[in-house]
Image: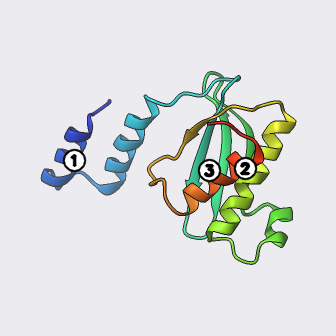
Amino acid sequence: MKFSKRVLLRLKNKNKKLKPQKFKKLKRQNLRGLIKGTSNRPRLSVYRSHKNIYVQLIDDKTSTTLISCSTLDRDLKLAMPSKNNCNSSELIGKKIAKLSLEKNINKVVFDRGRYFYHGRIKALADGARIGGLEF
C-alpha cells in the first residue's frame, strides 16, 4: 500500500492507534516505490544505528546484495577510534566506493532510507563521492 505524505502525516497525527513501527514501515514502503536498483546501477542502502553504520549495494531485480560494509569490519575497526561519528562514516563511504570500483560499478542510486541527509549520512555520501562513485 502506498500513501502520499499528506495521508501519512494525517495517519500519524490523528490516528493514535497507528504504532510508530507501523508508521515507519508505511513510510519505507512509500520510499521504495521511487528508488530501484539494477545490476548496472545498484541501490546504495544505508542503515544507521546509535553505535554503527551499515552500507549495502543491492540489485533489486534479483534481490541480491552485491557488496556490504559496516563499522564492524575488522580492518576498519582498528583504523577508527570511534564508530559513531562523521569521520568513521566517511571512511565507510570510501571503503564501499573502493569495493564497488573493484567490481566495475561506477554509478549507484543513493537510498538514505528514513534518515535525513545530514550528519553521518551526508558524511558517508561525501566519502563515497570522494572514493569515485557517482550518484
Query: At numbered mark 2, what does the secondary structure look like: helix, strand or loop?
Result: helix
Q: CA distance from mark 2 to mark 1?
A: 36 Å
Which numbered disc, 1 or 3, marks the residue that appears first in the sequence? 1
Residue at image location 64% in from the left, 52% down from the top = 126
Which numbered disc, 2 or 1, marks the residue that appears first in the sequence? 1
Query: What residue sits right under mark 3 in the picture?
Result: 125
Above/below status of 1 relative to 51: above
Query: What residue sits right under mark 1 in the picture?
Result: 9
Which of discs 1 and 3 lies nearer the camera? The answer is: 3
Between residue 33 and residue 102, name the one nearer to us.
Answer: 102
Between residue 88 and residue 69, name the one nearer to us.
Answer: 88
Crowdedness near tag 2: few (<14), some (14–19) or many (≥20) residues, C-alpha within 10 Å: some
Query: What residue sits right under mark 2 in the picture?
Result: 130
Mark 1 belongs to which amino acid? Answer: Leu
Residue at image location 87% in from the left, 37% down from the top = 102
Which of discs 2 and 1 lies nearer the camera? The answer is: 2
Q: Residue furthest bottom?
A: 81
Residue 116 falls left or right of residue 125: left
Mark 2 belongs to which amino acid? Answer: Ile
